[in-house]
Image (spheres, helix red, strand yellow):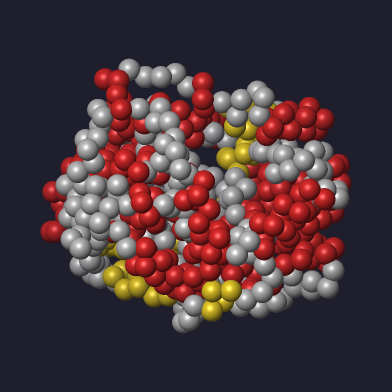
Amino acid sequence: MSFFVAYQPDTHDGQMARFVERAAANGFEIASEYQQGTLRIAVFPALSGIPAASHTEANGDFAVALGSLIHDGIASPACLPQVLQRFDADTFAWQGMLGTHTVLLRKQGRLYVFGDGLGATRLYTNADGTLWSNSYLAMLEIARPKRLDRQACLEYVIAGSVYGDKSMTEGIRSLSANSLLTFDPSGTAQERHLPSPIRSDGGGDFRSLDDAADHFNARLDAVFAPIADNFGDRLRLSFSGGFDSRLMLAMLLRHGARPRLFVYGSENDEDVRIARLICQAEGLELNCIDKGLAPVIDRDAFADEVEHNLYAFDGWKVENPLFDFGADRRDRVERHRDGDVPLNGSLGEIYRNFFYMPDRPSTTGALVSTFYSQFDPRAFGPLFSERDYRAGMQQAMRDAIGIDGDRLRRFEVEQLYPNFRGRFWTGRDAQVNQRFGPMFFPFLEPTAISDTARVPIAFKDLGRLQGSMISRINRRLADYPSDYGFALGGERPLKYRLKTLISTQRPPALRRLSFRLTQRHMQPRTGALAPDYLGSVIDLDFPAMRGLFAIDRVYSSAQYGAVATLEYLAERYGLTLPPD
């Protein structure tokens, strides 16, 4: 995402100047600056060179949109005059807004800052309230905290992201979802929490599978029609052999857009084979991207490559380390060539039983055991407490959906998918993608999410609802093969039904043990994680992380890469873990 930094110069002028210099060396130069009393605001463009959308009135009022934004059917920057005109802090509720964005808006002497309706774009502040940004890396470099947050480090390695309102470091926190940040004429800040625009009051008629499919297709029409109208054939769709990208393609074709598709994998991968079949049959352009073919760089150039990744990915990526040879970064920039606008189907599992949990009440503890226990206790050091880790995750879940206890009604389990997993895992990925240029994630839209928690689980199981949605839009697309081994609009084979039943009915206590029973051998540490490369950017003795992780017992290469990312941040910024 193009990003902003708002700071009090008396406190942060020196560090801000140093950050601006380093950011410019890595592709981010200040595009515009504003002032609100003693507060200064700097706005940075996207890595693709696409500027932040802005509009300024003659009286000095302005609106700036960072990321993707459509308002009442009009895309930014053209929509910004009406955004400014219609904004009222007393009645604001994300009316008519689509996209993954941060908006800065000055009106009648006050500066307002807010993110999207889900809260996917996180806004950060420091402990003394003198620094704000939607960039974690900017906060880290300017605020200069001293300690990593232990719980955040564990969550990142085990669960691929950071959950709740904390950040990777103590002293930097994110505002809660649906916060409106207001600066008065002097530059003094006030936070206010607004009601979520995501409704879950059972407003749909779900008496039959077809009724549910029609209900949610109508909701998606309100999302995809403005996207198709504004961007048309400039849209680039991330495609695979599954449900979510097929539903997006059906919606775009329904609304008159013919996107160009791109798929990841080698020529023999199932996703690539299915994408080729569909594109040939439908007359659509396809780009196959095999990141495994990216050239290996010279070891002496690796440190610079990692630093470029550090800035491009805002300090860290979900589930994946910072370390590669630049293929991921260059690919994300390439998506925006010639003003193209990418779409991604993440969070499409709002229409499926994502956690594979049975149709009965549960608990936050059971959900941690089911989905957030991908670890072996032997891979941790003396500072690790499994009890504290689980308690931290359970508290973040309670906060995400506003409950006091740990018992979950079945629809609350479904609420946790968009409001917990969606906001903190998918949302982080969506926010990072905006740093390369505007990109849409249609299933993160409150309009798409609303009411999905109340869908009967029997409709969500086996992808029945999503298959029906695709079929009722475009039967031909639903009848093509999928990487599940069946047509998405067809019958589910007995083997698939039995496999799903076994997964769903497996007790949480057993699922908690799955990772430690299956990850019993060291996975290869190759490519950018090979000692020759990794040892050029961090100390392979892991002095900062060794108290929390038993490095020699971290068998998963993905988790090893995550620990290495934390070590890199710790060594670069002088961070330490808090004592026991």
The residue at the point 47 percent across, 51 percent down is 516
Q: Where is residue 443 in the image (x, y as percent from the top left)?
A: 62, 55
Instruction: Give the residue displayed 34% in from the left and 67% down from the top.
Output: 388
Count of number-bearing discs? 0
Residue 298 quadrant:
top left
The reply to whether residue 34 is in sight is no
Q: In this view, does 314 lie to the left or right of 102?
A: left
Q: Position of residue 572 (x, y in %)?
A: 21, 41
The image shows residue 389, relative to residue 252, as above or below, that is below
Q: Position of residue 371 (x, y in %)?
A: 53, 59
Quadrant showing the C terminus = bottom left
Q: Is residue 142 above or below residue 564?
A: below
Find residue 122 and report its image quarter. bottom left
Q: Nearer the viewer, residue 126 or 186?
A: 126
Residue at 71% x, 76% y is: 203
Which residue shows up at 65% across the image and 69% down it? 453
